[in-house]
Each structure stands twice: as C-alpha cells, then as structure tokens.
Image (cartoon, rainbow, N blue to C red):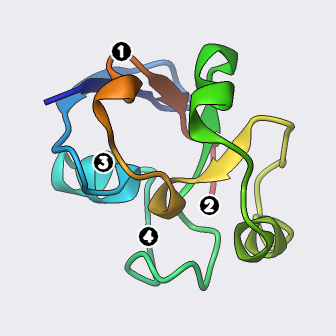
Amino acid sequence: MPKITFIDHSGEARSVDAVVGETLMEAGVKAGVPELEAECGGACACATCHVYVEQAFIQKLGAAGDMEQGMLEYAESSVQENSRLSCQIVISDDLEGMTVHTPPQQ
C-alpha cells in the first residue's frame, strides 16, 4: 500500500495508506480528508476533488486528459500548473511517498 500525504490549506498533514487501483480521491475520502468534497463521486463531472501535486510526481502521473482539463476550468480555487483532479489519479506503487495539497475551497 503506497503511503500518500494530503496537506490541507492550513498545513495539517494526513498520511494515508492507499490501495493500488483505487483513485487518489477514493483514498482521501475514505481517510476523511475534509477538503475533498468529491461531489460527483469520481465521475470527472465537477472539480471538487482538485489537488496540487508536488512537482516530483507530475511526470509519474502523465498529462491530464481533455475531460480533466475541461473540468479544472470550473475549479473555484486557483488552478496551477500542478493542478489535478484526484478522481483521475489511479494509485500505483510508483506513487509511494507522493504529497498533494488541497486548496482552501473546492
């Protein structure tokens, strides 16, 4: 189980043991990360699971797809170069030690 760290906008860190094959959003919601609203349940139909991925892991994730990029346009929080929707990130062993930050609002 890869360990992923979620850091909220106030700086509180939560380490999560994520299951390979589940999405980052699922792992965060199960762990009670409060700033992951995930209103659409992972259907890539909203932007309420927006996270900022630390630069060291951007290459491992690959580029965001067209649908994800389109949904990021609706994010209420500031979209950055490292913005991703956590529902579109599938956990793999390669993501061991990844840290993501949640924005102050979704």
Q: Residue at x 64, y 69 (%)?
A: 47
**Callout 4: helix, strand or loop?**
loop
Of circles 1 and 4, which is in front?
Answer: 1
Mark 3 highlights which residue? 28
Looking at the image, residue 89 lies above or below residue 74:
above
Q: CA distance from mark 1 to mark 4?
A: 23 Å
Q: Amino acid at mark 1?
A: Gly
N-term mark: 3 or 1: 3
Which percent across, then down, holds residue 60? 57, 29
Q: CA distance from mark 2 to mark 4?
A: 9 Å
N-term mark: 1 or 4: 4
Q: Residue at x 47, y 63 (%)?
A: 87
Looking at the image, residue 48 lies above or below residue 27:
below
Q: Amino acid at mark 4?
A: Ala
N-term mark: 3 or 4: 3
**Callout 1: helix, strand or loop?**
loop
Q: Are marks 2 and 4 in contact (CB under 8 Å)?
A: no
Residue 97 numbered mark, or none: 1
Question: Relative to residue 9, is residue 21 drawn left or right?
Answer: left
**Callout 2: helix, strand or loop?**
loop
Q: Residue at x 58, y 39 (%)?
A: 61
Mark 4 highlights which residue? 38
Mark 2 highlights which residue? 106
Of circles 3 and 1, which is in front?
Answer: 1
**Callout 3: helix, strand or loop?**
helix
Quadrant that contains the N terminus: top left
Q: Amino acid at mark 2?
A: Gln
Task: Decide: few, some or many residues near mark 1? Use Cα within 10 Å; few <14, some 14-19, many ≥20.
Answer: some
Residue 33 numbered mark, or none: none
N-term mark: 2 or 4: 4
